[in-house]
Image: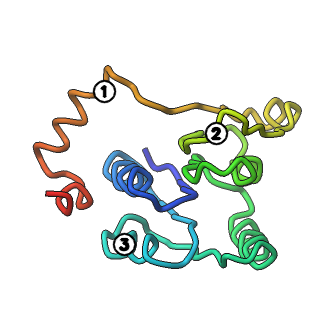
């Protein structure tokens, strides 16, 4: 409850997750993704409180993310990496506040590897959580579908 959330990525499951986070206690949700159709969809769904459109060019995107970091010097309580980019996963940890959580939600290739500082995780007490399919959550997901509690799901039907 009351968490500040930063979600990297605006794909279908990321947008559903953003809406669920907002409905279940996310106080301030920010979506960071490349400008374009997916980001426009995120805005039309009112999936977040704030949107950070990332340029496609790497240096410009890094500069924009630097601005996000400067605007949020204490970081975010929850950072979700939903892009499936190993490079983005490495960068995402730098946005997590002390005692916060980094959720690994993207789908990565078996050959992908990341480099994270164990010392940073230890000193800043960051929890790194993997999230994939949780079969025991299917009844809750079906309940959401039945109640049309997410705008994105309404668009599917």
Upstream in the sequence, badge 3 or badge 2?
3
> Are the residues tagged 1 and 2 within 8 Å (C-beta)?
no
In front here: 133 or 92? 133
Residue at 47%, 62% in the rendered image: 10
The nearer-to-camera label among 1 and 3 is 3
50 vs 25: above or below: below
Residue at 55%, 42% in the rendered image: 107
Pointer 1 residue: 137
Disc 3 from disc 2: Cα separation: 26 Å
Pointer 2 residue: 109
User: For the view shown, which residue lies furthest in the top direction?
Assistant: 136
Residue at 20%, 63% in the rendered image: 155
Upstream in the sequence, badge 1 or badge 2?
2
Pointer 3 residue: 41
**Callout 2 crowding tier (Cα within 10 Å): few <14, some 14–19, many ≥20:** few
Q: Position of residue 145 (x, y in %)?
A: 17, 44
Q: Position of residue 30 (x, y in %)?
A: 52, 64
The nearer-to-camera label among 1 and 2 is 2
* Left or right of residue 154: residue 103: right
* Left or right of residue 122: residue 40: left
Secondary element at image label 1: helix
Secondary element at image label 2: loop
């Amino acid at each position: 409850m009351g968490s500040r959330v930063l979600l990297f990525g605006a794909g279908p499951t990321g947008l559903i997750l953003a809406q669920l986070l907002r409905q279940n206690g996310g106080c301030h949700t920010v979506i960071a993704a490349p400008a374009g159709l997916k980001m426009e969809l995120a805005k039309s769904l009112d999936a977040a409180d704030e949107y950070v459109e990332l340029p496609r060019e790497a240096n410009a995107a890094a500069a924009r993310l630097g601005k996000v970091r400067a605007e949020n010097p204490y970081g975010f309580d929850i950072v979700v990496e939903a892009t499936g980019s190993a490079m983005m996963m490495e960068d995402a940890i730098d946005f997590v506040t002390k005692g916060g959580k980094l959720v690994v939600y993207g789908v990565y290739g078996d050959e992908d590897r990341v480099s994270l500082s164990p010392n940073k995780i230890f000193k800043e007490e960051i929890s790194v959580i993997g999230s994939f399919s949780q079969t025991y959550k299917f009844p809750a997901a079906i309940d959401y579908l039945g109640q049309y509690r997410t705008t994105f799901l309404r668009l599917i039907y």
